[in-house]
Amino acid sequence: LDIRFACVKTPYFDETWIGRRLDLEAITEMKTKGKDLDLAGENGEYHTMVVNGPMYKQQKRLEFQNIAAKELEQQKGQPSDQRWFVFDLEITKLAIMVDDVDDATAADTAAIVENRIQ
């Protein structure tokens, strides 16, 4: 599985976690951030997205280029002393790599994702 941090919140995380893989190295680092951090993110400390895995009908790989974070400000429910960061999809580029499909299907898939991002 390729799981990426898509939204993170202070005081446990900063913008450098956006796009980072949720892997053993990340979990090890998260364990050092204090006992109040729920490692599963159940208190909303972070949100993730699965971008690749065996459960997908076609094996696609999303390759991230120019990963950029965007700070959300004055969101409903956001404490004034907390900062929230998400993917900035206007800057972050996603390249779709499709295995074992014809060129037309790959082009259609790329067009669908590109339209959703814009």
Image (tube, rainbow, N blue to C red):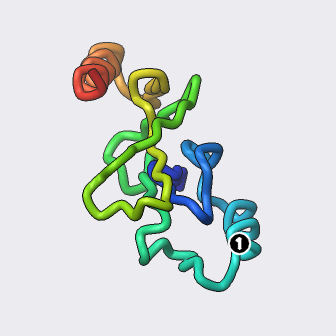
With respect to residue 60, does 24 lie above or below?
below
Side (left or right) of 105 relative to 64 = left
Q: Residues within 10 Å of mark 1 (few under 14, many from 20)?
A: some
Q: Position of residue 89 (x, y in %)?
A: 40, 29
Question: SS class of the residue under badge 1?
Answer: helix
The C terminus appears in which quarter of the rendering?
A: top left
Residue 105 shows up from this direction: no
Side (left or right) of 7 relative to 57 = right
Q: Position of residue 18 (x, y in %)?
A: 55, 45
The residue pinned by badge 1 equals: 33
Q: Position of residue 26 (x, y in %)?
A: 69, 61
Residue drawn at the location 46% of the way across and 52% of the way down: 84
Side (left or right) of 113 relative to 95 = left
Q: Nearer the viewer, residue 105 or 7?
A: 7
With respect to residue 66, does 42 lie above or below?
below
Residue drawn at the location 66% of the way across and 85% of the way down: 35
Q: Nearer the viewer, residue 62 or 70?
A: 70
